[in-house]
Image (cartoon, rainbow, N blue to C red):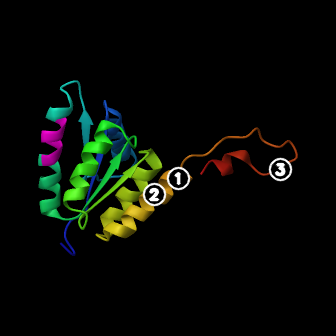
Amino acid sequence: MNGARMNILLVSHGKLCEGMLDAFGMLVSSCENISAFSLSESGVGDFRIRLEAKVAELTDEGDLLILADLKGGTPYNESYACFLKDPEHIRLAAGLNLPMVLEAGIAAMDSSDLDAIYKTALEAGAFGVQGTETPDESDTSNQEDDLF
């Protein structure tokens, strides 16, 4: 699958992953290689069947990075079962956040290197979690410049 399309699948409880995909689309012009798949009230069995079909579809096109909302939750656990079936072509990360999706999604537009994009997702996700401090009154820099 070298040189093939690189896909990203966002999985979550409820519509969190759909919101992430929507936000990605607002910030980046294209999101053709990113899809969202949510656990609904239809239950775990239905989710498993639909997820396995979606993963099979996406891995037929190339490598797949799955980004889950919560390690140990149903979307992650069912994704983990898919990962174990094809660890050469699937990577799985938990802790879904927008910086993770943005950086991985943009990287996947220019590269099909699964391990590099996986690493980018993990780093961006961790870096994206930041606390906010009260500005130091002695700081003379423009606070607006620090936003980005």
User: Is 49 one of the magenta-colored residues?
Assistant: yes
Would you name the residue on which mark 2 appears? 122
Q: Which sits earlier in the primary sequence, circle 2 or circle 3?
A: 2
Residue bounds of the magenta highlight? 47-52
Q: Residue at x 28, y 50 (%)?
A: 80
Instruction: Please rate how many residues cluster around mark 2, counting C-alpha atoms within 10 Å: few if below 14, some from 14 to 19, many from 20.
Output: many
- Which of discs 1 and 3 lies nearer the camera? The answer is 1
Q: Which sits earlier in the primary sequence, circle 1 or circle 3?
A: 1
Instruction: Please rate how many residues cluster around mark 3, counting C-alpha atoms within 10 Å: few if below 14, some from 14 to 19, many from 20.
Output: few
Q: Are marks 1 and 3 in contact (CB under 8 Å)?
A: no
> Which label is found at residue 73?
none
- Which of discs 2 and 3 lies nearer the camera? The answer is 2
Real-space Cα distance between discs 1 and 2?
6 Å
Q: Residue at x 18, y 36 (%)?
A: 47
Q: What secondary structure is found at the residue carrying circle 2?
A: helix
- Residue 35 in view of the camera: no
Q: Taken as a whole, is the magenta stretch helix, strand or loop? A: helix
Residue 21 horizontal side relative to residue 136, left or right: left
Q: What secondary structure is found at the residue carrying circle 1?
A: helix
116 w.r.t. 100: above or below: below
> Which label is found at residue 140?
3
Q: In which quadrant is the N terminus drawn? A: bottom left
Real-space Cα distance between discs 1 and 3?
29 Å
Would you name the residue on which mark 1 appears? 126
Real-space Cα distance between discs 2 and 3?
34 Å
Residue 88: x and y in percent read 24, 68
Q: How many marks?
A: 3
Residue 126: x and y in percent read 53, 52
